[in-house]
Image (spheres, rainbow, N blue to C red):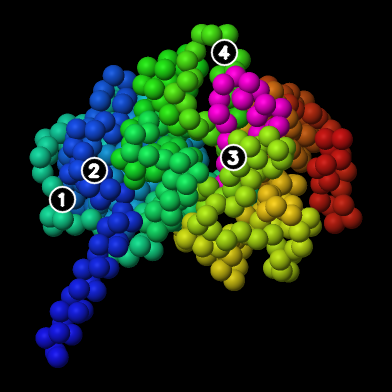
Amino acid sequence: MTEFSFEFCDSLAQKDIQMIKSMNIGWWVERWSDLHPDKAAILFEGLRITYSELHGRANRTACWLQSLGIQQGDRVIVILKNCPEFIELYLACARLGAIFVPVNFRLTYPELAHIIENARPRIVVFGSEYGEWMHRLQCVHGTRAILFSCVGDDPGGDPGIDYLRETRRLDGQVPFPPGSMGPADPEDPQVIMYTSGTTGPAKGAVLSYRKTFFNCLNADIFFDLSFDDIMLVILPMFHSGGLFIQTSPILYKGGTLVIHSRFDPALTFGDIGRHRVTKFLGVPTIYRMLIHAMTDGQYDLSSLRISAIGGEMATPELLKRCRKAGFPVRQIMGQTETSILFWACEEANARKPGTVGRPVFHAEVRLMDRNGRPVETGEVGEIAVRGAIMMTGYWQDPVRTRETIRDGWLYTGDLAQMDQDGYFYLVDRIKDMYISGGENVYPAEVEAMLKGHPDVADIAVVGIPHETWGEVGKAFIIPRNGADLSADQVIEYCRARLAPYKWPREIVFCEDFPRTPLGKVKKRLLVG
C-alpha cells in the first residue's frame, strides 16, 4: 500500500510538471523542433530560421544567461526593435524561469531610468542604436550589479558584453539542468510589461505563464490559427499586440512569423504577396497609411484570410475603407493587463457599427457600477474582467494593484454599454488616456512633466481627433505672470523628457480654465 502511494504521488508530480511545460512557450518551440525541425519559424530580412534552429538559438541564449548567473525570478530587460534576438531572449527567459521585461525603444532617457529603477534587472540587453543612453545608465546603475549587453556594434564606446559573440560561442549547448523548462508554478511571473501610469510614471504589469497560455488560446480562436499560417508582425513586440496576440500564438501553433523591424507600406505589401501572408494585425494608423499608399491593382492581398485591427477604436468609416481596399478586417480590443478582451468578426463589424465586439472565450467580463455591482443591459458601467487572462498585479506597486484588482475583478477604467446580443460599445474612459498611433498616452504624465517648466503656471492636456494618428494631444497652458512662453519652447522642453508620440501637437495659451467648485479642470469644456 505504501509503495502504491509513492508511485501515485510520483505520477501526480509528473503530470504537474507536464502541465506546467505545456504552458511554457519555451517548450512549444522545442516540441515543434522535434516534430517539424525544418519548418520555417521566422523570416526576417532574407534570413530563414527553422524551428530546429530557433530551438538551438534559445538554448544557447539560455546557457549564456546562466553563465552570467541569471536564474529564476531575475529580471532581463530587453530594448530591441523586432528581430530574431528579441525572440531568442524571450524563449530563453521562459526556459530558465527568468522574468522577461521588454521595454519601449521609443522612450527617453528619464523614462528608461525610471523603469530600470523599478524593475531592478540583472541585465539590460539593448540594440546598438541605444548605446548612448545605456552608457549613461551604466554610470548611474553600474554599482548595483546590473550587466549591460549590446546586440550589434556600439559606435558610442564600450558596449559591455557582446551579445552576438558570446551567444554564438555556446552553439550546441543546452541549459543546465538538462530538460529544465522553468517555471515552478503556472502563476510564476513570465513577463513584466510596462504601461504608462495615469497619475505618474509607468507601471509594470506582471504577466504569468498561465496568462500567456490562455491569451494564446483566445488568439487561436480569434485568428482561427493553423500550422500553415504565416503571420506578418509589424507591431512592436514590446507591446501586448505584437508579443501576445501575434508572436506567441503563432509559435504555439507551429506557424511562421514574418518580422519587420519598422513599418513601411511598400515593404508590407511586398511581403504579404511574396510570403503569402495569411494573418495580419495593425493599429488604425497603420491601416490609414496602407490605404493611402495603395493604387488600384498594384498589391496582391489574396492570401490574407484575416486582417485584424486593434490598439485603439476603429471608426465604422475606417472599417468600410479597409474592406473596400481588400483587407478582410475583424476587430479586437484589449489592454496590457489582459491582452485580447473583446473581438468582433467581419459580419459583426458591418451589422453593428461602433461595437468593440463580444468578450473572448477565456474570460469573464462584466459592466460594474461604482459600487462594484453589475449594471443592466443598455446601462453604462465600467468594464471589469475576471479569469485566466488577468495580470497578477503591478510590479512593486501594491497600492495601484489594489486600486485595479478588487474582489477578484480587474477594473479596466473604460466605460461601456452592452446590447441585448452581448456586444459591447465603448462610451468613455474613466481615465483621460488617449491613443496616438497605437500608443497609450496619459495626460497626467504629460501635465506633470510640463508643470516642471519654470514658465508654466498650470496645464491641461486632452486627446483630440487626428486624421493620421487617430488622436493627438492638445495642451492648454496658463503661463506664469509675465512669462513670454512660445509653443516651440514647450516642445523643446518635451524633447528630452518624453517620447515624441506623447508631445502635444497643438498648444493653446489661456488665462484660466473652466473648473469645478473643487478646482478640478473641466476638460470637456476646454475642447468645446
Looking at the rendered structure, the secondary structure element under dot 1 is: loop
Q: For marks 4 and 3, give the CA distance.
A: 25 Å
Task: Using a 10 Å C-alpha cutoff, classify the residue at mark 1 as few (fewer than 14 neighbours), some (14 to 19) or many (20 or more).
Answer: many
- The picture places residue 438, in percent across and down from the top left corner, at 57, 34
In-image side of 169 versus 335 (left or right): left
Depicted 206 relative to depicted 173: above or below? below
Callout 4 touching callout 3 (CB < 8 Å): no
Marking on residue 175: 1
Q: Which residues are magenta?
A: 312-335
Q: Which residue is mark 2?
A: 32
* Residue 426 within the magenta-colored segment of the rendering: no
* Residue 334 within the magenta-colored segment of the rendering: yes
Q: Which residue is mark 3?
A: 345
Callout in the foreground (4, 2): 2
In this rendered view, identify the residue nearer to me: 226 or 322.
Answer: 226
Callout 2 touching callout 3 (CB < 8 Å): no
Three-letter code for the amino acid on which mark 2 is drawn = Trp
Marking on residue 293: 4
- The picture places residue 243, in percent across and down from the top left corner, at 42, 41
Residue 385 visible in image: yes
